[in-house]
Amino acid sequence: MTIVVSGGTGFIGRHLVRHLVESGEDVHVLARQGSRTDGLPNAAILHRIDDPLTLGPLLLQIRPSTCYHLATRYMHDTTAAEIPALLAANLGFATQFADAATRSGCRAFVNTGTASQLNVRGAYMPASLYAASKQAFEDFLVYFDRRTGLPCATVLLYDTYGPDDTRNKLLMQLVAAARTDTEIALSPGEQEIDLLHIDDVVMGLFAAAQALHNGAAHPAHYALSSGRPLSIRALGDLIATINGRPLRAAWGSRPYRDGEIMQTWKNGTPPPAWKPRQTLEDFLRKALKA
């Protein structure tokens, strides 16, 4: 099977590409100029994309059966000067990719969204302009699915973690503080976080694609949840318990961010036959000893 992955050089993308290559798939990765590619397997075929208009001819040549769209420009707080780049990446490039996938005969287009598009009741309430842009593209996909014949699924992601993560995410900041016994400045910590291991994320994306190939109704809307959301304070307590000493957390020394999600949405539908298998506790035991 021939597969195209946008954003394949990012944390989630690298792990997805590695899994697909190890499964014997013919994998093509779309990447911006300047993005690091050292984490990609040698068998993955890299395409540097300068102009989104080149996606059409490229995908006509590749003829992928499946496309995964992971490329995104993330920013929680957006200045006026940053808006054009945000829209160019999250709507412009994304729409060109979906259009190219349609014209190439792709039979499954899997998009990634963010749970920050929704409030605790599952209603649309974007926590940021970034989240609004992700919702806008999901709405665009309804057109491609219903009017152009491109089977589409959007998979909402919460927080992800795992090995080889170069992002400066809160979980690894807490782990680093615990290992070095240094103080870390934090918000009051009552907001919820839903953490899912990267291996489970990869299998969830794969399951969404397989569902489309197997004739599942579309456009589909799935969510990948650990099923075990916890507050930041509870996460700190868990790390302290596993580490065997209190976490030096300065709770309340930082304010909550504007648009902070205090409670996560818990009623999303997972892809068929998917469920999380990795545990946060197992990961923490290894990470705190590393």
Image (spheres, grey):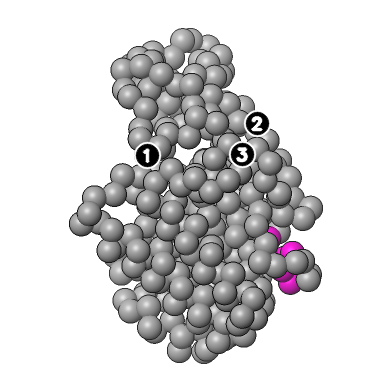
Magenta includes 154? no
Q: How far apart are marks 3 and 2 (CA)?
A: 17 Å
Q: Which of 87 and 18 is in front in this view?
A: 87
Q: Can residue 184 be seen in this view?
A: no
Q: Which residue is drawn at 52% across and 89% down?
A: 61
Q: Which of marks 3 and 2 is in front?
A: 3
Q: Residue at x 39, y 46 (%)?
A: 128
Q: Find disc 1 in the rendering and name its residue.
A: 168
Tags 2 and 1 touching, CB below 8 Å: no
Callout 1 amino acid = Asn
Q: Find disc 2 in the rendering and name its residue.
A: 228
Q: Quadrant of residue 174?
A: top left
Q: Is residue 155 left or right of residue 140?
A: right
The single residue placed furthest to the left in the displayed view is 81
Q: Find disc 3 in the rendering and name its residue.
A: 121
Q: Is residue 197 left or right of residue 94?
A: right
Callout 2 amino acid = Arg
User: Which residues lie in the magenta part?
Assistant: 208-213
Q: How far apart are marks 3 and 1 (CA)?
A: 29 Å
Q: In this view, does 203 lie to the left or right of 120?
A: right
* Helix, strand or loop status at disc 2: loop
Q: Residue at x 49, y 45 (%)?
A: 125
Q: In which quarter of the image is residue 206?
A: bottom right
* Helix, strand or loop status at disc 1: loop
**Marked residue nearer the N-terminal end (2 or 1):** 1
Q: Which residue is drawn at 65% across and 38% down?
A: 266
